[in-house]
Amino acid sequence: MNKPLTILGIESSCDDTAAAVVRGNDVLASVVYGQTSLHADFGGVVPEIAARAHAEKLDHCIEEALTKAGLAFTDLDGIAVTAGPGLIGGVLSGVMCAKGLSAATGLPLIGVNHLAGHALTPRLTDQLTYPYLMLLVSGGHCQFLIVHAHDQFTRIGGTIDDAPGEAFDKTARLLGLPQPGGPSVEKAAETGDAKRFSLPRPLLNQAGCDMSFSGLKTAILRARDSVVAEKGGLTSQDQADLSASFQAAVTDVLIEKTRRALATYLQLDPVKPAFAIAGGVAANQRIRQGLTALCAGLDTDFIAPPLRLCTDNAAMIAYAGIERMAAGEADDLTLSARPRWPLDQRSAPMLGSGKKGAKA
Ligand code: KG4
Ligand code: ZN
């Protein structure tokens, strides 16, 4: 049997500086330096601040990953780096760092699409066989992908405006709940009545797997304003009921659209049908439960990798690099950083992808 490849992964496409060492399917080390506090006063990620912080932190992060893995550069087979899509300054910091390391060590350089990193994560964690269906659902992205091979993806639908995580964050802001909004809305919803407010289920009556979440944000704003107009403020029960109603609407849309995406995927007659989820919103228990039940009814495995591998990290970049290298692929020092890099080059660009910024 071939010796498994050992690869250093580097990720710097948004506001997480990350390095990891992966050997085959084993994550030997995964280090993530967040930048949340640096951007906290600005209401979003500031590209220049992010790029500078990546440039300052990357070498420490890489050193820490190698130390944790107990390895030196001479133990590695290659260096994989996110080459896009993302905030160009951040992507450039990572690519330049990887090029420097590759030139100095002679190790092969492998450019990785950040979205491919997310999409291949269930192969790292659960060794899924192709083809499988993937829902990438985060603060900046929402799309269904059929993953046919490490470099072959079909996007069969996605949001035409906002991502669900963004809608959770906005809802929390409107209700006076802390950020990030997903966990706080989920917590508040535990004691809420999901039927008290009747919110829309956008695009549910339209065929296909496309989704829309911006109207839901407006609907929650109106519902909140009507309560405030009536009572002069929100009680914690109002917050709970609004949160539960919002969460139920998002869940209904995601479940129904997943049902349709699964129908398209199952037409391929996969030997071992599997549906995997990634991105921060995958942490939501209600959404997970709905998807678990849906898959169970369709004899399809439901895979939700551990959250630390669902959100931005470098282990997924290292693993995608392993798949590329195993297929005999590599880049050279002409590798360029790409702000936009759709996984499925054939589908029309989505209105919503990257609207909030480049975080994928
Ligand atoms: O993948 P991720 O860490 O990075 C970004 O895309 O920014 O996802 C973060 C997003 C945030 O919008 C956050 O509110 C959402 O995922 N999120 C959740 C939950 N935990 C995090 N949304 C719903 N329910 C949750 N439990
Ligand atoms: Zn991402």
Image (cartoon, helix red, strand yellow):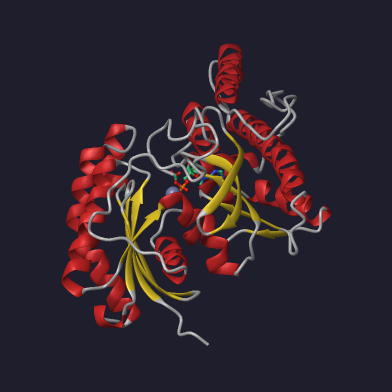
**Residue at x-position 49% and y-position 54%:** 118
Q: Nearer the viewer, residue 5 or 58?
A: 5
Q: In which quarter of the image is residue 30?
A: bottom left
Q: Is residue 85 above or below residue 352?
A: below
Q: Where is residue 120 in the image (x, y as percent from the top left)?
A: 52, 59
Q: Where is residue 126 in the image (x, y as percent from the top left)?
A: 60, 68
Seen in the image, is 96 located left or right of residue 272? left
Count of numbered circles on the image: 0
Seen in the image, is 333 located left or right of residue 145? left
Q: Is residue 228 above or below residue 103?
A: above
Classify the position of the C terminus by image quarter.
Answer: top left
**Residue at x-position 70% and y-position 43%:** 261
| Residue 29 seen in this snapshot | yes
Q: Which of 160 and 154 is in front in this view?
A: 154
Q: Position of residue 32 (x, y in %)?
A: 35, 60
Q: Where is residue 24 in the image (x, y as percent from the top left)?
A: 47, 76
| Residue 283 seen in this snapshot | no
**Residue at x-position 53% and y-position 20%:** 233
Seen in the image, is 356 located left or right of residue 96? right
Q: Quadrant of residue 235?
A: top right
